[in-house]
Image: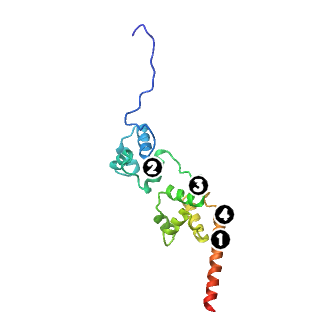
Amino acid sequence: MPFCHLTLRARKPKDSRYPKELRTIGDRLRQRRLDLGLLQRDVAEDLGVSQSSVRHWELGQKSPKLQYGPTLRAFLGEEPSLEQAATFAEGLRAARRAMGLSQRRLAELVGFGCPDTVADGERDTRTPTPRHLERLKQFFEEAGQPLAFLDPAAEKSAARRSETTSSAWATRRARHQV
């Protein structure tokens, strides 16, 4: 109206496609995509996946494969948080996932004969040997991952276990030689 010098200001309502709650990775992906004004095909191209993959993730019909973890975190602007790991097992799992590796693939890259070594370390059912710890340290250092999760107590425990195992084998050999 010409006689009223009033300007109304309000935030533009969010797009109806905008997630109301951020419960899943798909919700966060959709929020980020809409915030950046991108189409699903743009995001798919950036992530190196198909447009249908992005659509399925956003709708919660499928979950992204582990190998897409690092790319998704980068798109979402998230950093992997390895500092939250309280134990060696949690740290190993977090570091492996941050790199988008399966247990089998990490075992192959580190040179373990069997992925069970990684699985046991992540479940904390068996402490890695000093040799395995050294291989893991070297691998994660070369990959540029923080090594705070490699707890010196775990190393000492592994060393003690190795010594105990060696003495147990020596005792068994001695019994069989008699």
Identify the element where label 1 is drawn: helix
Q: Earlier in the sequence, mark 3 or mark 2?
A: 2
Identify the residue at horizontal 63%, vertical 64% (top origin): 154
Instruction: Read off the residue under disc 2.
Output: 72
Q: Earlier in the sequence, mark 4 or mark 2?
A: 2
Mark 3 → mark 2, Cα distance in angstroms? 21 Å
Question: Quick one: which residue is furthest to the top in this view?
Answer: 3
* C-beta proximity under 8 Å, tags 1 and 2: no
Identify the element where label 3 is drawn: loop
* C-beta proximity under 8 Å, tags 3 and 2: no
Residue 159's disc is 1
Q: Amino acid at mark 2?
A: Leu
- In percent of width and height, residue 86 lies at 61, 55
Write down the quadrant of residue 137 in the picture. bottom right
Instruction: Read off the residue under disc 3.
Output: 85
Instruction: Read off the residue under disc 4.
Output: 153
Q: How is the image coloured?
A: rainbow
Q: Earlier in the sequence, mark 4 or mark 3?
A: 3
